[in-house]
Image (spheres, rainbow, N blue to C red):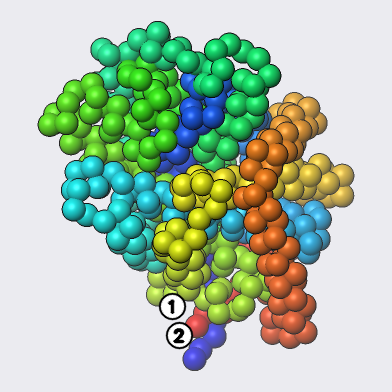
Amino acid sequence: MSEKSLNLSKTLGSFHLWGIAVGLVISGEYFGWSYGWATAGTLGFLIATVIVSMIYTSFIFSFTELTCSIPQAGGPFAYSFRALGKWGGVIAGMATLVEFLFAPPAIALAIGSYLNVQFPYLSPKMAAVCAYVVFMSLNIIGVKVAATFELFITLAAIFELFVFMGVVAPAFSWSQFLHDGWGSTSHFNFQAIEGIFAAVPFAIWFFLAIEGVAMAAEEARNPRKSIPIAYTAGILTLVSLAFGVMIFAGGSMDWHQLANLNDPLPQAMKHVVGAHSGWLHMLVFLGLFGLVSSLHGIIMGYGRQIFALSRAGFLPAFLGKLHLQLQTPYVATIAGGLVGIAAIFADDFASFGGHSLTAILVTMSVLGSLTMYVLSMISLFRLRRTMPDLPRPYKAPFYPFLPAFALVGALFLLAAVIYYNLGISLIYMLLMLFVCPICLYIYKQNGKSEKIKTPVSSAFEAEGMEKASVTKIS
């Protein structure tokens, strides 16, 4: 065994980061969101999406300040650690891990459902496992290869969404979209408002994980310049696609038939062009690109988050190993994948409240993300006060109003998700109460070792990870 200072390689530019930003999220345009129709109807869900998109846009423009000021692989964990100490850091880090570990199984299951449309004999779960293995391997090969692949399939996924909208456009009718628009009630009333709040997790799914670009910041060539470009272009791209896909799908057929499906787009297109149309086959194959893009990108994200938490001493040291030649966090990538594969098969022996496995995974991911959003905005305000001299090449516009809107919005969304998903929220809280103290215990034990303590301390110097190092293991 030999030891040597080693950092993640810096190879990514603005275009790669934009591809990661959109790619992390774009599966949300392909599936998951349609469950919101089941609770709120098309009009109620449209309102929920407008509210969520406004909050996400304000959050991203504020979050970009943190990413540019502290360009570290830990992302939200690093910001909260710097601003709020070890408790803030570990809660933000674990919440981010919940988001990034529970979203991939839902996406992988959707990949299995899409393939099952084309190959009915293929088990969706086995297809999901195979997808995990393939994209974990690709992430381990190298970040430049992984990011280039991510960019390519993201562009293909965007193209396919435009194809979908174009193919179903002739069947589009506002009367179909507006029919039963408030869901279980005939007009806007208190029941409709309840449905809007209940649909919030599925509107969030349109944008969930865009903040994962922060975990690639340490591998960007010029993060202070390229990250603002990637985030701005990314959120505008996603907002446009979300509304386009939702409106065209809902107006192309009876939306009730799509409200509880993992593959709403192929089913909508099948209704318009028939089961044997070449357009449908094209959507099934190319539509996989959107799911693959998000699965691949989020695997990249959870690998960096586990790596960063291990490097800082909050997780066992072996999870922070980098591959000797490839400079990728291979142990963290494999460990997170094993958690996701276990989640895929969890419904074989466990169920909860009549919810589908996908809906449970989506809700757990949303709870983790909203916790992290709240802590990130609190960290932004605290760092402005406690570290006024921290280099800020990008500053949140309309400070303090825009970050305050993002913070209040995140708190509102978190309260709505908890209220309408009490059972799943309780599981999430118990998980956090169990895991966070364990991580703090590991951190305390690591702090007793000077060998571990030195890289942990240097990781949070003013200029960030340029001064940080990890152990290179052979």
Considering depth in this image, is 260 or 82 the residue closer to the camera?
A: 260
Out of 5 and 331, give the one closest to the viewer. 331
Q: Is residue 413 left or right of residue 174?
A: right
Q: Residue at x 73, y 43 (%)?
A: 374
Q: What residue is shown with label 1?
A: 324
In the displayed structure image, the side of residue 15 where residue 50 appears, left or right: right
> Residue 233: where, in percent of width, then height?
50, 32
> Dot 1 surroundings within 10 Å: few (below 14), some, or many (20 or more)?
some
Q: Is residue 22 above or below residue 185?
A: below
| Badge 2: residue crowd in 10 Å (few <14, some 14–19, many ≥20) | few
Would you place residue 251 above or below residue 12 in this image? Answer: above
Amino acid carrying mark 1 in the image: Leu
Quick one: quadrant of the C terminus?
bottom left
Q: Please report the residue visible at 70 percent of the width from the left and 39 percent of the height from the top.
A: 419
Measure how far apart labels 1 and 2 are at the Cα level: 6 Å
Question: Which secondary structure lies at badge 1?
Answer: loop
Residue 97: give x, y in percent of width and height. 59, 58
- 26 is higher (above) or lower (below) than 99: above
119 on left or right of 290:
left
Q: Which residue is mark 2?
A: 474
Regarding residue 233, the answer to whether it shows in the image is no
